[in-house]
Structure formats: C-alpha cells, structure tokens
Image (cartoon, rainbow, N blue to C red):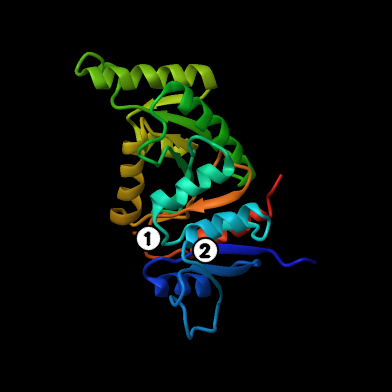
C-alpha cells in the first residue's frame, strides 16, 4: 500500500507545529514545509525547505506529491493567493469544523472576512458545506443566521438587508432561517451559515479563543484537493492534521 503524505506549513512558532505532529493521530505521514534553516538539526520530522514554503506546499499538493495540506503557521494572504491561482478559482470558500465546550461539532461558513456577502455566495456555501457535512457524518439541519429577529425589521437598514438575504437563501436552498438565534440553531443543525464573513469570523474566534470550544480547521470547499486552512492564533494543529487524515479516508 502506498504511503500517503500530508504537508503542513511552518513560518513562525515551529515548536507549536512539531508538538501538533506528535499529538496527532494521523495514519498518513507528515512533512513540514519551511524556509531554509528553520528546522536545522531537528531529525524527528521530515521537512522540505524552500524560500517560499507556501508555494512549495501548494505546488506539491497539486503535483500529487501530497494527498492533503494544512496551512499551519504560514501567512494567510500569500498562501491562499497561491492556492487560488494554482486551483484556478477566483475566490475560496471555507467552512470551519468547530466543536463547542460540550462536544457538539458543526460546520460554520463563511469564516473569511471576504466571503459570503451575497445571496449567490451563501447558496453555494450551503450546497458545498452540506455535502462536506454528509461526508463527515454530520447529519443535522442547515441553519441560516441573520442579524436579528424578524420582528427587528425596520430598526436599521443593515438588519433589514440581513433578514431579507437570509430569507432568500433559506427559500432557495430549503434550509431553515434561525434568525439571530444561534443558540437554538446549534441544537438541531450541523451546518451554520453566518450573515457574512465578518460575523462568521467573530463567531469562530469567540468560540475557540474565548468560549472553551475547539477549532478543527477549515477545509476549502471549492477546489479539487484537500486543503485545511488554519489560524496562526491556534494553540495547536493536531485537530487540523486529524481532519485532513479523516477526509482522505472519505474521498469521493
């Protein structure tokens, strides 16, 4: 049986990445992508040095040398720009796999501040995130969130726009509009669609950095490779490596 490889990027805090590798439960082998000298003298992991490790990571993913990739601590802008160009897409759609403090797992999208601002974008996110949720055995409803309750209409133009968008997305996708009631949505939903990328990013950060929840990484939904995006603020990347390994076993 051919051994599969998962690549993970290192820019800063290489010790955090190395700890994550040792804590992961991956059946696949792991290789680090870093600048020359970053891991000199460290022999407990395999690594590839390159002056532009993000380019090397994405390049090897698309050349088939890697079965999956995790961003790790590589910078977001340059790495994701390379991914977009290499994948031939004009934007990236991501859904974060999150876990509450009580162990409830769900997918949240959009989580990039530039994602999910239109009805069409959110309709695509529903379709792609629902498909991923099914592959992962998350079988709850799809919840569309908005910036208020329906009774709040008229209080502010942005609230009105958010409510109208959510109603439209729910109508087009068959999902359920939970309004602003995320605490109710999580009881029955495995996919949550935030009103926009800013609020989605705030939900993710509040849960994982303030609320004792966990982030497992954010798979990119609209490319034909497994790429798990991560935040450099994460304390650990073992969950993201495990997620990549899990998705490899559930490839279509």
What residue is rendered at 47% in x and 82% in y?
A: 40
Q: CA distance from mark 2 to mark 1?
A: 14 Å
Nearest the eye: 35 or 161: 35
Asked if residue 43 lies left or right of residue 14, the reply is right
Which residue is identified by label 1?
234
Number of the front mark, 2 or 1: 2
What residue is rendered at 35% in x and 39% in y?
A: 113
Q: What SS does tag 2 mark?
A: strand
Location of the C terminus by quadrant is top right
Classify 71 as above or below 142.
below
Q: Position of residue 232 (x, y in %)?
A: 37, 59
Location of the N terminus by quadrant is bottom right
Which residue is identified by label 2?
8
Residue that lies at the very extreme toward the left in this rendered image: 155
Classify 49 as above or below 52.
below
Q: Quadrant of residue 215?
A: bottom left
Classify 235 as above or below 111.
below
Classify 109 as above or below 249.
above
Q: Position of residue 104 (x, y in %)?
A: 46, 49
Graded by Cα atoms within 10 Å as few (under 14), some (14 to 19) or many (20 or more), the crowding at tag 2 reads: many
Q: Position of residue 59 (x, y in %)?
A: 59, 55
State if disc 1 and disc 2 touch (CB < 8 Å).
no
Q: Position of residue 37 (x, y in %)?
A: 44, 77
Residue that lies at the very extreme toward the right in this rendered image: 1
- Marked residue nearer the N-terminal end (2 or 1): 2
What residue is rendered at 72% in x and 67% in y?
A: 3
Residue that lies at the very extreme toward the top in this rendered image: 154
Would residue 155 be seen by someone viewing this image from the given angle? Answer: yes
Graded by Cα atoms within 10 Å as few (under 14), some (14 to 19) or many (20 or more), the crowding at tag 1 reads: some
């Amino acid at each position: 049986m051919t051994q599969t490889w998962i690549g993970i990027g290192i820019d800063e805090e290489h010790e955090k990445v190395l700890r994550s590798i040792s804590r992961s439960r991956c059946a696949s082998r792991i290789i680090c992508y870093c600048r020359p000298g970053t891991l000199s003298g460290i022999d407990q992991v395999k690594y590839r040095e390159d002056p532009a490790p993000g380019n090397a990571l994405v390049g090897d993913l698309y050349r088939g040398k890697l079965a999956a990739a995790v961003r790790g601590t590589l910078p977001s802008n340059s790495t994701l720009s390379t991914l977009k160009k290499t994948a031939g897409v004009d934007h990236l759609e991501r859904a974060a796999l999150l876990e509450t403090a009580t162990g409830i797992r769900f997918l949240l999208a959009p989580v990039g501040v530039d994602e999910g601002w239109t009805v069409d974008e959110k309709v695509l996110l529903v379709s792609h995130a629902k498909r991923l949720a099914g592959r992962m055995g998350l079988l709850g409803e799809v919840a569309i969130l908005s910036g208020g309750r329906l009774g709040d209409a008229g209080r502010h133009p942005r609230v009105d726009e958010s409510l109208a968008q959510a109603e439209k997305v729910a109508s087009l996708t068959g999902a359920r509009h939970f309004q602003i009631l995320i605490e109710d949505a999580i009881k029955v939903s495995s996919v949550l669609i935030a009103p926009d990328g800013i609020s989605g990013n705030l939900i993710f950060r509040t849960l994982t950095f303030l609320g004792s929840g966990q982030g497992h990484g954010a798979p990119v939904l609209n490319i034909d490779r497994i790429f798990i995006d991560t935040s450099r603020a994460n304390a650990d990347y073992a969950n993201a490596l495990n997620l990549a390994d899990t998705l490899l076993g559930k490839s279509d």
